[in-house]
Amino acid sequence: MFWNEEFETLPKEALESLQLKRLQQTVAKVAASVPLYRDSFSKSGITADKITSLEHLRDLPFTVKQDMRDNYPYGLFAVSLEEIVRIHASSGTTGKPTVVGYTRKDIDSWSELMARSFVAAGAHKGDVIHNAYGYGLFTGGLGAHYGAERLGASVIPMSGGNSKKQIMIMQDFGSTVLTCTPSYSLYLAEIAAEEGIDIRSLKLKVGIFGAEPWSEQMRGEIEAVLNLKAIDIYGLSEILGPGVGIECIEAQAGLHIWEDHFIPEIIDPETCQVLPPGERGELVITTITKEGIPLIRYRTRDITRIIDEPCICGRTHRRLERMSGRSDDMMIIRGVNIFPSQIESVLFNVKGIEPHYQLIINREENLDTLEVQVEVNEQTFSDEVKGLQSLANQIRREIKDLLGVTCKVRLVVPKTLARSEGKARRVIDNRQR
Amino acid sequence: MKVQQISIFIENKTGRLAEVSRILGQRGVNIRALSLADTSDFGILRLIVDQTDLARQVLKEEGFTVSKTEVIAVEVPDRPLGLNSILEILDQAHVNVEYMYAFVERCGENAVIIFRFDNIEEAIRILTDQQIHVLAGERIYGM
């Protein structure tokens, strides 16, 4: 099933020539209207007419999050505010947020891409879409909302939080599609269980989960606990919001990135060189249809690789492998690079362990220490000390085997680790204090 | 012959034991015997109470991880080598004791020891064969 079959199945050559044409237009536009690009292009002698092949993308400069901060709030907009109909901002954990503006056409494209994404995920007109992404400056809520309306589904604008009410609405309104962060879906399942409601018996058939990294093991857990198909969605506000890429329900293996709107590249985050096809590295995206804030070679910090093999669903747009972390979420512990998602995959393989965990990093006498906190539930609780110690040892050993890092495993009482209603806070790094 | 015991996962934080005893006390549950196994990180509190199911339920409601295990209560002569006589029997039969602790009350002239075994059925058979008195659960909860 397609939303826009013509574009979603465009042959590779046609797609690439469309990309080239749109890239040239974008380069010409930003060179004329965005001071950051005008200056850097003129320094390196870049003009739109020199872009005669997609290979020339490599000659263009990168854009990084700091550029957005330096040009706060509107410095990177390529149009005047009169043409901007919506402004979103991403939560700035440090300093100012990054601000993005959308023209009417941008909102239209976004709705189109989200509608495509919903259909790829198995949603249809007639579905009741329970949208528990936050509404507000965060792009998740409104992005999914507009796409759901474009699709013609019945969208319930729940936003995040108020979890008991979410369960009631899901049950009473017959929600068939759930959109939220993956960790929140498991939290909702816990709340439902506490309320004595069998979440598996609800009408939910598909969950579209994004905005935080998750693992294949977590997908298995979510599908088992909620009795639905769990689909990974990708997006970031700088580029668009949700709907940059989506898994198809046919394959559930990699996220199709909508290549008629974006050009993806994979670089080595250290050397910034483009990596050979199929290698894993940092995702860089160039927007080629955006009007409000077009970005050239934006470094997403997300770690993935491009899957070029044809997909069984028939879409010709290439796929991104599930994000395996962020280059800035990467923890360096005693010189070893570790992503929280790697620890998560270890925990999921230990029978009975809850999918909630927290990583605490300290520096004691100039040595980094990693403490992994996991919850003991009735399934894993042993009446004997040696039983619990062997559980902790097993986790420690498997982390050591996989990641080469020795950690301390602390068992904690269930529900003591914070369940976030938005993005889960997995890592507490005390070294920076 | 078996006695129901509840085991509670306790984090090594101040106030946890007080919390457990408060929760049980407020619901009218009386603790008959207890033992605490502790490591540097966590502890396991094992209790025999007069209302096992109620105790388990109220602790679970308060977010504790609780499990129910079966142990046996054995009458032990309250004199030198009294406990040893029991342990020798178990040793000769190659029955492994997981853990044990003493009951507060006496049963007549005898002390009462709580035992946890890997193979509880086997242990009961061996002890009763040797005329050792294994106390019934009802007897223990009401002592």
Image (spheres, helix red, strand yellow):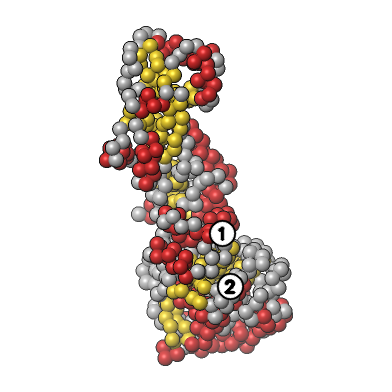
Q: Secondary structure at mark 1?
A: loop
* Residue depicted at 66% across the width and 65% down the height: A251
- A347 lies left or right of A70: right
Q: Amino acid at mark 2?
A: Ala
- The quarter of the rendered structure image containing the C terminus of chain B is top left
* Residue depicted at 54% across the width and 39% down the height: A394
Does residue B64 sit above or below A29 in this rendering?
above
Which labelled disc corresponds to residue A276?
none
Q: Quadrant of residue B102?
A: top left
Q: Which subunit holds the residue at mark 1? A: A
- B28 lies left or right of B1: left
Q: Amino acid at mark 1?
A: Asn
Residue furthest to the front in view is B138
Q: Do we see residue A336 in this rendering?
A: no
Task: From the top left corner, tell me how far across and down residue A137 is, in percent.
Answer: 40, 75
Q: Quadrant of residue A70?
A: bottom left
For disc 2, the neighbor class at 10 Å (few under 14, some 14 to 19, many from 20) is many
Does residue B45 sit above or below A403 in this rendering?
above
Q: Secondary structure at mark 2?
A: loop
Which labelled disc corresponds to residue A227?
1
- A204 lies left or right of B115: right
Residues at marks 2 and 1 on the same chain: yes
Task: From the top left corner, tell me how far across and down residue A360 is, in percent.
Answer: 42, 49
Closest to the observer, A95 or A225: A225
Residue furthest to the bottom in view is A82
Task: From the top left corner, tell me how far across and down residue A311 is, in percent.
Answer: 70, 69
Does residue A245 sit above or below B80 in this rendering?
below
* Residue depicted at 33% across the width and 12% down the height: B109
**Disc 2 designates what residue?**
A123
For disc 1, the neighbor class at 10 Å (few under 14, some 14 to 19, many from 20) is some
Closest to the observer, A64 or B30: B30
